Image (cartoon, rainbow, N blue to C red):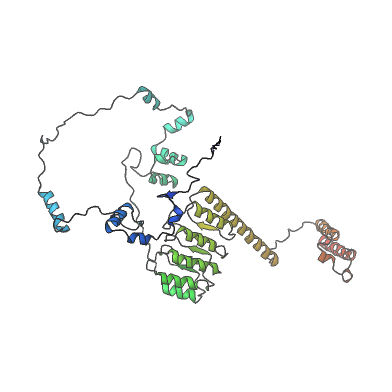
Amino acid sequence: MAITEQTSSTTKTTTLTTPAKLYGKDLSEYDEVDVDALLAQLSPEEINILAKEVDPDDNFLPPDQRCSYECAKDPTGPLNRKKLIEHINKQALETPDEPEFEPYVKGTVRGKKWVPPPRDESEVAAEEQIAIDLGEEYEHALSDATQEEIIDLAAILGFHSMMNQDQYHASLLNKGQPVGMGWDGITKSTQPKLFPMDPPNNTDVEESIKRVKDNDSKLIELNLNNIKNISDEKLEQLFQVLPENENLEVLSLTNVGLTDKTALLLAEAIEKSKTLRVLNVETNFISPPVIVTLVKALLKCRTIEEFRASNQRSSVLGNKIEMEITELVEKNPSLLRLGLHLEFNDARHRVAAHLQRNIDRTEIQSSAAAESSLMRSPPSESQIAPLPPLSSPSLVLSAHLQMLTNEAATPPASPITASINTAQMPSVETEFEQKMQLTAATAEGAATE
């Protein structure tokens, strides 16, 4: 007798373990399919059906072009849009109003007046004011206070909701409250201040490019902000001659229509720049990956201290881009200020902490350099403070004795001073005796006078 053994598997097949299939085939089999050849086999009706199922993936197209047109009927007649609008307006003006069922009579009240329902007593009791005992001194002071004094007190305590801007600034400047602007007065609007418009940027782009190319020593800051008609060719010319310049320190390119193509050329120019300290490319059309490229270029240019690139076409960078920028900033020891909007707290805190460390290190290095320069240069006579006069010869003698004793007991300060040939110098005892005799003679002369 044949015995058949049946075994059961305990392994469960899930959607994560099984590969995805389309029409019974693995998706990898469709990688080599020629889509153009498949579309060429379709009829116009089938292509229209396929177009209705798929919308064009282009955000810059207007909505009427992104959506499929459903109406395929022939027009019933010619369409003149201007005449149609004139006919609609004329018909609206000539059509009489519908007659009212009851004519309007001035002063007549029709219908019922709405009366709010009575409120619950518990709610009314909860809204009752709580009595606060301020003490006799404070109650007496506040009872006699005028409205202007209470407004000044509210400004001091920070109760800004109790006053408007004019009252608040008048309290701070101690000008007195305006007449008729109290809590019981008429509410008046503050007239806005008219400020003149900023003048347009009249910088000559071609002349600026020529000065950068000629390495003009007077051209330290180049401001091309808000110039609309700068072509990509001019920007490319500027970025090509930028690495050769040795005097330009500040470059501002805000709102000039900078795109990814020209921004990549700017990144290459930054890597070779030797004097650029401030770079501003805010309000342009730079994508987040290109911003990462610009921040990465700052690692090779150790002179840039400030970089600003906020307010681009893509307002949100994303977690991946922000983490890449954070890691690049943490590797940069010279960057002091960064103008970027970071959404995640981790990136903001790490960037802020690293920039603060760079600022502290820069301040320590500058203070150490200043101290070393002061130590190299001897002090002038005006910087040396004179010694105070001594009143008696005994004090003069004791001061000289103390000074000579300290000099005699002081050991050599360094190996260099210890290695000096002592045979060419007088002994300490002989010098000490000579100074003692000179001090005694000085004291006797002072006593005689």
Please tell me whether residue 111 is drawn above or below residue 405 in the rendered image: above
* Side of 369 where 27 appears, left or right: left
Residue under the point 45% across and 71% down? 236
* Side of 301 where 113 appears, left or right: left
Considering every residue shown, the one lying at the far top of the view is 121
Residue 65 image offset from top left, x and y in percent: 29, 57
Please tell me whether residue 105 is drawn above or below residue 122 in the rendered image: below
Q: Nearer the viewer, residue 186 or 103?
A: 103
Q: Nearer the viewer, residue 27 or 309?
A: 27
Please tell me whether residue 62 is drawn above or below residue 420 in the rendered image: above
Residue 131 image offset from top left, x and y in percent: 43, 26
Residue 322 image offset from top left, x and y in percent: 51, 53
Question: Quadrant of the rendered structure where residue 87 is?
Answer: bottom left
Would you say residue 372 is visible in this rendering?
yes
Question: Quadrant of the rendered structure where residue 204 is?
Answer: bottom left
Residue under the point 14% across and 55% down? 76
Image quarter where the N terminus lies is: top right
Residue under the point 73% across and 60% down? 387
Residue under the point 42% across and 61% down? 285
Image quarter where the C terminus lies is: bottom right
* Side of 299 where 70 appears, left or right: left
Considering every residue shown, the one lying at the far bottom of the view is 214
Q: Nearer the viewer, residue 209 or 19?
A: 19
Would you say residue 253 is visible in this rendering?
no
Residue 432 image offset from top left, x and y in percent: 87, 63
Count how many numbered circles sit on residues in the image: 0
